Image (cartoon, helix red, strand yellow):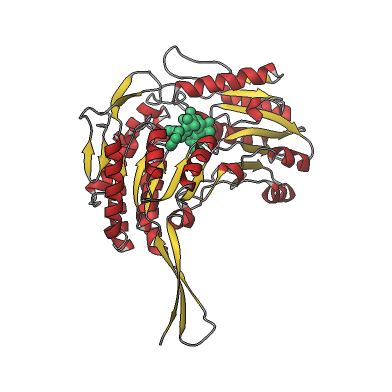
Amino acid sequence: MYENLALFIDGQWRSGDGRATETVINPATEAALGELPHATDADLDDALAAARRAFGDWRRRSPTDRGAILRQAAAILRARAEEVAANLVAEEGKSLTESRIEVMVAAEVLDWSAEEGRRQYGRLIPPRGPGFQQAVVPEPIGVCAQFAPWNFPAIFPARKISEALAAGCTCIIKPSEEVPASAIAIVRALEEAGLPPGVVNLVFGVPDTISRRLLASPVVRKLSFTGSIPVGKHLMRLAADNMVKTTMELGGHAPAIVFDDVDVDQVAAILTASKFRNAGQVCNSPTRFFVHEAVYDRFAAALAAAARGVRVGNGMDDGVVMGPLANARRREAIEGFVADALDRGAELLAGGARLENKGFFYAPTILGDVPDTARIMREEPFGPVAALTRFADTDEMLARANGLPFGLAGYAYTRGLANAQAVRDGLQVGLLGINTPQIALAETPFGGMKESGHGSEGGSEGVAGYMTTKFVSQLAL
Ligand code: NAD
């Protein structure tokens, strides 16, 4: 059964009472799943007051106590994984296999943060004179405002909430209105695990209204946003007024570099799986494929054949690899990118059209010899399209790969040490996979460079991002 949609403020589930609502849609069928209540101004003010009040006690709890609640919530989430995954498919569209993995990763993230909270050590600095003690003491930064996007409805809320809580912070989180069920399930798990009222507050509504009201409040000390670069810049401007610390995980346009010394079929298979995961709606999805001219034709043919073999359909159906796009906006955007590239002389190697009458389906698409002037080579496509281009000289290729303001992820496939070293030294990205698409784990930091953002989630860096340091210089009298 689909989730009972509600806000969670100061330990209470709130809905109805004349609140505005919006309809959550299944992107595979366009059927309505439920009505999501929007927070009123009074709800947001209550959330701010509750988070501020709860911070007083929560920050003083031991990291072990805080971690026990997070770990218990992870266990509850795992026990409900099937139901949560099915709801995730229904509202976001990705396959059941991917959704199950996502829910289990979300639980793992809660566990990781629980443990990482116990490792916020601080340090002692050797003093210059006798009787001095110089200590750097980490402290939770305070109340956090968090905004999560629609492409990973379970992992992003799990990361943001658990890292804040493990650090001793309290939070108000606004997940995406289009995919609210997973975040609600995570908050229910935390509630059942014994989380005190006010520590997590969950709100939905008109994003701009919510972010303006929360960030206008001096109560908020940290902003964490995952989403598009323009919205990230807008939120940073709002955060500047109260000098709020920010973590920004924004868009990417990942180069996937294929050198001439690889097994072309093997690399085409790896890149097909990573390209069409979540229908390409992944910030670190490989998007610009730089392929060495010596293997370009063979690689393009192998990739196109593999793309044509990707089974597309309702994510709940057996054997489906790729579901619909998550919303109608995304499909229109992809149609625009493909039309523009073809107008500018790109070659259509696979896909390039809508599928099905109902639902936001679009075929896995491969574009060959895409000119650098095409929009898809400059703007993040965020969909199931790979844009291929040739290269001969590594330095020139790296200059093109680095020529955009993005700097989130990059991938290179090669057997050559010199090639790997050139990419490792030369590519301006926060996440680099050499001969592997594996760049996101609970224990590794995830974040970008340049306009792709700053700060990281995951790894030791994730929880540390919710701390501030106090330097204490003490002299015994
Ligand atoms: P969008 O720019 O309208 O919104 C992006 C996200 O920001 C959404 O989750 C939205 O709810 C939220 N948002 C929008 N305005 C906000 C505001 N004023 N305050 C707080 N949150 C706000 O775009 P979209 O159509 O939803 O998504 C498409 C684009 O977003 C993609 O092209 C991609 O670049 C980016 N995106 C990136 C990620 C990521 O993982 N980095 C995830 C989802 C979307």
Residue at 47% x, 52% y is 243
Task: Determine whether, in the image, residue 18 is placed left or right of residue 360.
Answer: left
Quadrant where the C terminus lies? bottom left
Placement of 441 over or under 138, stated as above or below: above
Residue at 27% x, 52% y is 72
Placement of 221 over or under 337, stated as above or below: below
Figure quadrant of residue 122: bottom left
Which residue extends farthest right?
Answer: 393
The location of residue 153, given as percent across then percent down, is: 39, 36
Figure quadrant of residue 267: top right
Residue 209 visible in the shown view: yes
The location of residue 23, given as percent across then percent down, is: 32, 23
Which residue extends farthest top?
Answer: 357
Q: Please tell me which residue lies in front, 341 or 131.
A: 131
Quadrant where the N terminus lies? top left
Placement of 413 over or under 127, stated as above or below: above
Task: Determine whether, in the image, residue 40 is placed left or right of residue 292.
Answer: left
Q: Count every numbered label the image shows and give the total.
A: 0
The location of residue 30, given as percent across then percent down, is: 37, 18
Residue 79 visible in the shown view: no
The location of residue 446, given as percent across then percent down, is: 51, 48
